[in-house]
Structures are given as C-alpha cells and as structure tokens.
Image: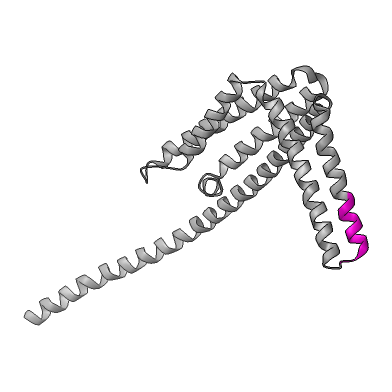
C-alpha cells in the first residue's frame, strides 16, 4: 500500500474518505439500530471495499503504460472478493468482530500478566509490577466478558470499531493532502527551473549560428 500511495497520492485520500464515512455510519447504526448492525456493517464495508477495489484496478490500468503488471490489481481483487463474501454472509462479521476483539483483549491481558511476572524476576520497581498486573487483569476480564455477554458486547465493540475506522480514515486523508501538496510544490519548483535552462540553450545555439557565417567569410577571403 505504501508503494501504491507513493505512485497515486490521490488514492490515499479516497481510501481515507471511505474509511471515515464508513466509521461514522457504523457508529450511527450501532446507536440507533443495534439489532440490524451486523447487516448494516456488512453492507457498509462491502460498498467501501468495492469502491476501493475499483479505484485500485482503475489506477492499475493507467500504470500499464510503463509496465506489464501493477500490484494495484491484487489489492483491488482482494478488496472486491472480501466485499462479495460480506454481501453473501452478511451476519458473519458480527460474530467475527466480537470473537476477534475478545481474543485481542485476552491476549493483551495475558501478555501484561506475563510481563508482570518477568518484572518480578528481574526485580523491577514494585509500582510498575502492580500496574502491569492490574492492566493484565483488566484486559483479561474484558475479553472474557465479551465472550460471556456476546450480545451486550457487540454494541460497544461496533462503536469502538467505527471510531477506529473513522480515526484511521481521518489520518489517511491528512497524510494524503500533505503528500499531494508536497508533490505539487516539487513539481512547481522543477517547472520554474526549466525555462531558465531552455533560455541558456537557446542563447548557446544562437551564438553558434552567429559564428558559423563568420568562418565562411574568412575562408572566402583567404581563397580570394
């Protein structure tokens, strides 16, 4: 993706805008229609993936001018394939997100608890050990509760997912705009330097043309 953004900076803005809109819609659906959030989230993500995939393929077609294949085709195909899966199995994403988020919370909790035990072995400061034990217990508890109270956890996880998507989209838009401004500035600097080089070349050519007839005149006088 980084290489794709370097070649087509406008795609980063498109990608960020899609994620920003999708994240806001997920939050709105989570708060107002929690019973239909799984289908709504599947539709929103599928549409975003379709648009993103189409933009990747579109940019890849124009890249064929200089090469035979572009990685943008792979990104576009994957995005469209995932979008089709979400459309066909529109309830799958609900169970997946809750299970995925719960597993991440449990894993983080276990990691913090393991670090706390290691800190005891390495004789770290006691406040740090206590803090890591508390963080590990909190994350582990949240992860287990998301498994037990699956329905109640869905709304919270959906809102958090929408917020993360919106934040990622906003950051991508900012980076895309900054990269576009820098690219235009560099292009303008290069364009402003080109006329100077052209003028020098024209002056050099005109001097050569002026000297040539003079040499012919001298040759003619010598022959005479």
Which corner quadrant of the image does residue 125 belong to? bottom right
Can see residue 166? no
Q: How far across and down, in percent of the image, does residue 91 sit?
A: 67, 21
Please identify the residue farthest to the bottom as the structure is shown: 222
User: For this view, does 133 lie left or right of residue 221?
Assistant: right
Find out whether residue 31 is within the magenta segment. Answer: no
- State the count of labels: 0
Q: In the rendered image of this protein, does residue 35 appear above or below residue 114?
A: above
User: Which residue corresponds to the image point at 64% horizontal and 49% vertical from the top-left?
Assistant: 178
The span picked out in magenta is: 124-134
Which corner quadrant of the image does residue 222 belong to? bottom left
User: Which residue corresponds to the image point at 52% horizontal and 49% vertical from the top-left?
Assistant: 3
Q: Please identify the dominant SS of the magenta region.
A: helix
Q: How far across and down, in percent of the image, does residue 199 sit?
A: 41, 63
Looking at the rendering, in which quadrant would you find the N terminus?
Answer: top right
Can see residue 112? yes
User: Which residue corresponds to the image point at 57% horizontal and 27% vertical from the top-left?
Assistant: 83
Which corner quadrant of the image does residue 60 belong to? top left
Q: How far across and down, in percent of the image, does residue 134 sit?
A: 90, 50
């Amino acid at each position: 993706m980084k290489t794709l953004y370097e070649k087509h900076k406008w795609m980063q803005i498109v990608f960020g805008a899609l994620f920003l809109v999708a994240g806001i819609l997920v939050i709105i659906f989570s708060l107002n229609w929690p019973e239909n959030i799984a289908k709504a989230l599947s539709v929103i993500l599928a549409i975003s993936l379709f648009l993103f995939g189409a933009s990747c393929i579109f940019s890849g077609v124009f890249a064929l001018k200089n090469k035979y294949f572009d990685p943008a085709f792979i990104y576009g195909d994957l995005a469209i394939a995932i979008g089709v899966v979400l459309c066909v199995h529109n309830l799958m994403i609900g169970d997946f997100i809750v299970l995925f988020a719960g597993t991440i919370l449990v894993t983080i909790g276990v990691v913090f608890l393991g670090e706390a035990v290691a800190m005891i072995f390495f004789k770290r400061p006691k406040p740090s050990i206590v803090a890591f034990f508390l963080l590990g217990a909190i994350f582990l508890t949240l992860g287990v509760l998301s498994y037990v109270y699956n329905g109640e956890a869905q709304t919270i996880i959906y809102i958090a997912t929408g917020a993360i998507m919106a934040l990622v989209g906003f950051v991508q838009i900012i980076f895309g705009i900054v990269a576009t401004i820098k690219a235009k500035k560099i292009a303008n600097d290069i364009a402003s330097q080109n006329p100077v080089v052209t003028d020098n070349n024209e002056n050099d050519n005109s001097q050569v043309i002026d000297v040539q007839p003079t040499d012919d005149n001298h040759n003619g006088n010598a022959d005479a």
